[in-house]
Amino acid sequence: MTQLNNLDSELLQDLGDFPEDDLDIVLTSKECRTLQPSVPEEWAELDPHVRDCVQTYIREWLIVNRKNQGNSGSCSFSRVGSQKDFLKNKTLQKQTFESDDTLDYGNQNDQMGCRPLTVLCNESGRMPLSSCDLDLRGLQPDVHLDRLLQHVSAEDFVKQNEEARRANRLAELFALYPAVDEEDAVEIRPVPECPKEHFGNRILFKLQTLKFDIEIEPLFASIALYDIKERKKISENFHCDLNSEQFKGFLRAHTPCIAPSSQARTAVLSVTYPSSDIYLVVKIEKILQQGEIAECAEPYMVLKESDGGKSKEKTEKLKTQAESFCQRLGKYKMPFAWAPIGLFNFINISTLERDTVDSESWNVRAVPGDRKTMTAQARRLSDRNSVYEEGCTLSNFKPTTISVNSFFKQEGDRLSDEDLFKFLADYKRSSSLQRRVKSIPGLLKLEVSPVFEGLSCCLTPEVLPVKPFPELRSRPTKEILEFPTREVYVPHTIYRNLLYVYPQRLNFANRLASARNITIKIQFMSGEDPSCAMPIIFGKSNGAEFVQEAYTAVTYHNKSPDFYEEVKIKLPAKLTGKHHLLFTFHHISCQPKQGTSVETVLGYSWLPILLNDRLQTGHYCLPVALEKLPLNYSLHSPEKVPLQIPPIKWVEGHKGVFNVEIQTVSSVHTQDSHLEKFFTLCHALEGQVTFPIRVLDQKVLEASLEHELKLSIVCLNSARLEPLVLFLHLVLDKLFQLTLQPMVIAGQTANFSQFAFESVVAIVSSLHNSKDLSKDQHGRNCLLASYVYYVFRLPEVPKDLYKTGGTGATSMPDTRYYTVGRSSAISVGSKLMQSRLMSCSNPDIAGTQTTADEEVRNIMSAKGADHSGSRMSTFIEASNEIQPACAGPRPANRKHFHEELALQMVVSTGMVREGVFKYAWFFFELLIKSMAQHVQHMGKHEIPRRSRFSDRFKDDVTTIVSVVTSEIAALLIKPQKETEQAEKINISLAFFLYDLLSLMDRGFVFNLIKHYCSQLSAKLNSFPTLISMRLELLRVLCSHEHYLNLNLFFVSSVSAPASPCPSLSSQNSSSSSFQDQKIANMFDLSSEYRQQHFLTGLLFTELAAALDTETEGISKVQRKAIRAIHTLLSSHDLDQRCWKPELKTKIAALYLPLVGIILDALPQLFDFTVPDSRSGKSRSVEEEPESPSTISQNVALAIAGNQFSLLKPHATTLSSLPYKQYSMLTPETTRSLLICLLWILKNADQSLIQKWFADLPPLQLSRILDLLYICVSCFEYKGKQSSDKVSTLVLQKSRDVKARLEEALLRGEGARGEMMRRCKTPSGNDRFPGLSENLRWRKEQTQWRQANERLDKTKAEIDQETLMSGNLATEANLIILDTLDMIIQSNSVDCKDSLLGGVLKVLVHSLSSNQSTTYLCHCFATLRALIAKFGDLLFEEEVEQCSDLCQRVLHHCSSAIDSTRSQACATLYLLMRFSFSSISNFARVKMQVTMSLASLVGKSPDFNEEYLRRSLRTILAYGEEDVDMQPTLFPAQIDELLRNLNSILSDTVKMRAFQEDPEMLMDLMYRIAKGYQTSPDLRLTWLQNMAEKHNKRKSYTEAAMCLVHAAALVAEYLSMLEDHFYLPVGSVTFQNISSNALEESAVSDDILSPDEDGVCSGKYFSEIGLVGLLEQAAELLSTAGLYETVNEVYKIVIPILEAHRDFRKLATTHDKLQKAFDNIIKKGHKRMFGTYFRVGFYGSKFGDLDEQEYVYKEPAITKLPEISHRLEGFYGQCFGEDTVEVIKDSAPVDKRKLDPNKAYIQITFVEPYFDEYEMKDRVTYFEKNFNLRSFMYTTPFTLDGRPRGDLNEQHKRKTILTTMHAFPYIKTRINVIQKQEFILTPIEVAIEDMQKKTLELAIATSQEPPDAKMLQMVLQGCVGATVNQGPLEVAQVFLAEIPADPKLYRHHNKLRLCFKEFIMRCGEAVEKNKRLITTEQREYQQELKKNYNKLKENLRPMIERKIPELYKPIVKVHSGTRNSFRSSFKKYETQSSQNS
């Protein structure tokens, strides 16, 4: 054996080696609520059954504990708890995030919105670069960074950074990670609820006052609960005396002693099943007096004490009478009044029902469903149990005082409970009861409140004091026993033995006249002598605690009274045949007569308590004897009393005349014949009984005892469920005793093992199958779980076990051979028999007995002697008697419970076997608990594990595991898959193996696990199911507290188990393998690893398999696997024993293969970088592929600065892998996996990782960088606001849902779906298959969680969460930084530019995320180290990264936090300095910094120019102080650069002013971009800024146009550089896309040369960049619906792709083209393009906008009021609402008439206008809406200034506007540069109207297919009776006479011809309509025809009249102006006709 080195052995001691005795047997005393436990007094005389019951109730719990539970992966406690506890002892440092600070400048920005708009005066758009708004030197620089300019070697620099990073780090990463949801935490085996006494919802009632209008006598109140729906009384009575001392004095003679308990005025009532039908009924009695109830109640209704006078006299008189009645009849009462109180009118029922209404007590119905629900249910359940016991469910209702102001008078003939229920039902239905029943005014006040814990001075229903019960007693509170409406399934845990007697009715109607005022005296007799009345009847209020007799209330002069009395009796524990109830019937004389006593006996009846030794309960109708009862009457029931001499006289000849009901609440009387018989026969076996014995109504002889007992065992399951559950603990104890206890009955050995076992299985099945009983999340019945956990102990076998035979071992039968039904084992099945052949634990197969080791035997016998005092170690005592210490081998006749149980499980068949394996968990837990007790009792915990149990037992266990595994597989391959059942059995098996690891040899258990895995693999073909099953089992096993030792994470120590893999050399140790093994192998899941680290190896194998599989349902399995590993690592991290870093390093080494697995799973990880599109964030940029001849789409898009999606990093490298469809992981799962990766990177041996990085091929290294890139986004801090809204985890989940929603969109058709697909998957394949499964469920779950989590969280908790998430983000990013450092160091010798690029990309990405100042400080330091070390590479090769870096650093230069700013300034300065040093001309860096700032300014709304200026000043200061650089040109260049930057900042100040005015903002950006005409890189940047702004506003067309202009600009410069035929010839090629693109024509070559360093060096000035820009533009055009333009764009792209032979890209391009053309066909006319408005600004307030006119392009279907409201609102904010006025008409504005102090806006709707020649080319709907420059609007007017007039006065003005550029353009508003106006005369207006009408008719008539409705509508408008005045009136005005003015002849003639055509078209339309109409429209058609004919007739003379002058041969017209007008008018006619 290789020994451990010293360090390892020390560390191993910290962790604790695997202990031999891992389990501890603990006896825990039961929690007793009362000061003294409830036990019977006469203990010695008890019969065996009662003694057993009581013994069970007071016996301690026996619990098997794990000694090291809770140390590591043991998940008996929840992960959340461990994290919270852990953080209690740690102080987290608060991380500062800029996003959290509400900075002042945010408010400044808001105020800047309202500056006067005078900043746009410079038309050229740009000031010279040299001029500055603000002088930088006038500012104060920030604090400098020490030693920035000192010379330090790169290595020292790196070391310093490393040391700085290591300081102040939290060692435990998982302490910061939000605890995962325990939805699949299968390893949490809930600790069952401790069995307790059942309570429902407890309510406290305090009776405060009872008063009536007159107070003349004592009154007695009692309360009880009634359920009117169930028609049941649901609580016992609570009696209360609220009388004054004066009235109590009236009764002093009758109450000699008053017990404190009888003075209670407060009661605790319990309601298990709340309902609105429950009423609290208050009954009031008074002392019996002469007169009917009505007479006695009358004074209360008519008199008032306050009246005085005669009333007072009467009251006094009544009081005197009452006093005399009290003295004489004080012990008899009479009914008086009652009042119902609807309890749940005062208590909100929902508060109760929410927790209990669907539950049977604490037994919730477990609905089969996903484990999540069940876990939640189990959690709620455990809460609820505690709630019931402590009675705090109702703590959420407010204490209420209820006042009752009137009482119903009792009616003598309606006193029974039946009558009461009728009354209550009436009362609930209506208030008519109040009118029908007389009421008595009075006042009862009672307070109702919830019961809180620690209620003091409380008494149980048996009047036992409950803790706490103080010495100084106040008035006590009584607990009132509940009689639940339905069964309550809670086993008895306390001794309770109560009897309730309810006399109901007596019929003495035919009795003598003397029987009138009847009362019944009730006594419980122990014999027939009057002195045998037992004082066990509970007293009522203000009297003795126990009395010997109770009297019923008297109904005056009623011979057949009803009774409502409840007599409560404390039953003696030992009952005999002599015990009986005696009823004595009395007549009470109310008037005192001389010589007569108060009582006159009328008769007697009785009821024996036992019948056939069984307690009598139920309804009885008893006869009444008239004379004294004969001797021994109590031995018979009154109905069957034998004939007496002299005979007994009976009322009505022995008929039943007295109805009585008896009920019991007892925890010793089972009230079930099956249970009664079973217990009786069991005791017959144990005790010294004389045969024959009586069992119920039969006698059992000794010979038939065995048969009867077996029969009773079999019938046990037929018992009713409620009594079975109530006595469950005792029943199971007895059955287990019988399993182990062979009996010698009448000389024959009887073995009950099999019967008892089968009965147990049957009971277990029926408890599980009952819907009324609850189960935990693993489907385990809660009652059985708590039985095994607390109650079960090894059966005690009595010493006098064998009733016959000699002494000594020889006469003991060999118990192993007497298992009944052994033959049944044959039918188990051939497979099972084969597995049994080798087993020597089957007695039917001969096997040699191995002799025990001498030493082992000595230890055993010695231990046995030690334990001889234990009452559980009967076996050992027996062994001491019969087996001397030095005896030979232990005889084989010893029966052990665990062996017997295992054997019974193995040999069971049929239904029993099915039950055993279905509910295997129960038998497994029994096995484990009995094995643990066996080890402890036999003192075996010091014996090596492999010798603790017999080989036979081991064989049985092997068989059991094998059979259970087969059962699991069988369930899963059934056609109707029983997956849920299989999962439960699988978990049970997992826990069994888990427990076996603590008891048996580990090698043996590992073998079982190995067989399980191989057996399942052989039988299951569904891969996800197989992995899922094995995973759940492994997850449970890995939660073992000694998991690390089990995995030999150090070495195979001496006690290590043999591995199930024979190839494992036990000498192999991981500590020595560091040197021997190749380091690379340590990161692989090799076979050596799997052999050496068995469980972890299995777990990793399952994870790798799950990730590598692509089948349906695999995502759940992947989540399970990742959760398992996450939970494991988390538990190691938070394990107090693993705090030493060396130990964590060792543990991390165990998990190194996980890194390899995660690397392989890279394509499947959720890409957190995708949904995040925060502005100003640098995008991921792909490296170019090796071959220059191909362009990857990803690369193209990325290089094109795809603003709308962040690409999957290194998609190009992934495409080199074989193409495979992966199943994607969800965000939550990915997050869990990545936190595991970071933990390993943090804790593993750093030098080891560095060596591994050094050997990795470049492809693998780049994948690691991709992983780190994703990690940055994954653990990004979400800000305080997020934490305030929802918890971190919930936020994560909602992102998950968002991802799913996006996925749903991705599947959608149309532009949105296309866009989404484009955003998500640059490579074109769908990345998220199957993500939307369970979307709906997920949604409601997260909503529910959010609501609940938010409600429960305090501000402190939210702050703590924010603190944790901030620390997590910082720590995660620091680990990433450490790793990047290691990658650089490991490859520093030959650092390839691609590697450096990858590292930079991650760093830049981390800078673009939300980071803490702590991280930024370290990140900038690392960047400076990189610049110092690899400056040359950086500036020569990594151009793209360098530009991104500049942008990010500049962004942080504008930070509000000083430390971040100073770090960023230092880094930027160093960047410039090194670039100058390395290439001594830093034009490129200058250009990049300038572009970065331009980009930042355009995109980032959140940066602060004031801070940025200060940073520029700081950089200037560095330049001035840098002594080394003074001799060079560097300071001058810096100066120039900073001035440029400063001027760009000045532009931004202007932009800030127009943040709220999008048009103005775009104008400004447009001007800035125009100002950069000579600087293509910057112009491009600004065009992109504009595109991004447009995109945010959803102006997709304009965004696309910006990109088209950008592409034209790139094309222009590419054509200067390269002359390729396939490239566009500059911007000219873009004319077809947009005529505006010509603006991008390059300025002359002498001004700018693209070859100049630093110019056109950006990533876009390349063919790939051009393609990227164009593809992006095409996407946007497609989104905007301009599909025709998409075609034009791709016309430029396709030649380039063809030249590059990129066929994959060509395929997707043509696919997109096809979609575009399809859309044109489908959507042609349905598309909506923009709506246009002319907007004019008037007033000096507008500054340079004054008198400017624009055409605005608004979204389709924008109405005039919308744009009017928007502009008025915005400018109203700028100048004040009263100042801005909208001009309502579109007439020309006369500025002289306007108020100079106001701002006027005129808005007019305009339509596109085309000349006649244009219309020939603009054929399609798209062409008429694209490339628009002319617009028209019309204004009606009359010559006298009115807008409208008569037909002959109505003129019209047409205005045509021409804009500077064509729409669509890169802005949404364009200046109007030309304006033309035409005026139409009234007749021309009429001609236009008629032409329009005629055209409408023509279109409606020729429409195909014809539309009858449309046609009729148009026709009606032309010829309808009501409107034919329209055309006719026009004709009459203009055609009635020939005009006098010859100039109007042509117009007159034209109008005449118009009418001619109009009437012809009307005729055609009428004819067409005739063909289209249905039969019922004939009349309508005739009407139309008539109207048409009438119109035609009226028009005919005017149409036929020609102007003769017009038809002369030639007419010359001299007016040139009219001609020009005419031609323009013609144009308009044609255009309007075509338009319509």
Image: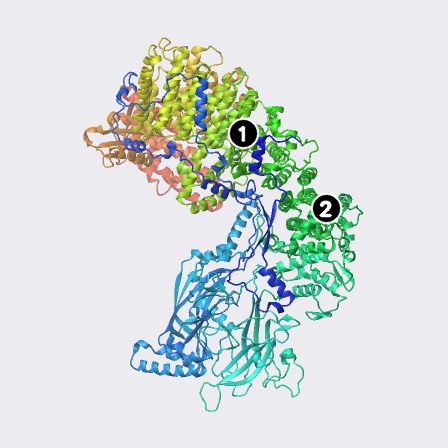
The residue wearing badge 1 is: 1244
Image-quadrant location for residue 836: top right
Percent position of residue 570, x then y: 55, 70
Image-quadrant location for residue 113: top left
Number of dots carrying numbers: 2
In the image, residue 1574 above or below residue 607: above
Kind of residue at disc 2: Ser
Give the CA distance from mark 1 to mark 2. Answer: 44 Å
**In the image as oriented, which residue stretches furthest toward the right?**
846
**In the image as oriented, which residue stretches furthest toward the front?**
886
Mark 2 secondary-structure assignment:
loop
Kind of residue at disc 1: Ala
Q: Residue at x 30, y 77 (%)?
A: 307
The residue wearing badge 2 is: 950
Quarter of the figure that contains the N terminus: top right
In this rendering, would 909 be left or right of 1135? right
Q: Residues within 10 Å of mark 1 (few under 14, many from 20)?
A: many
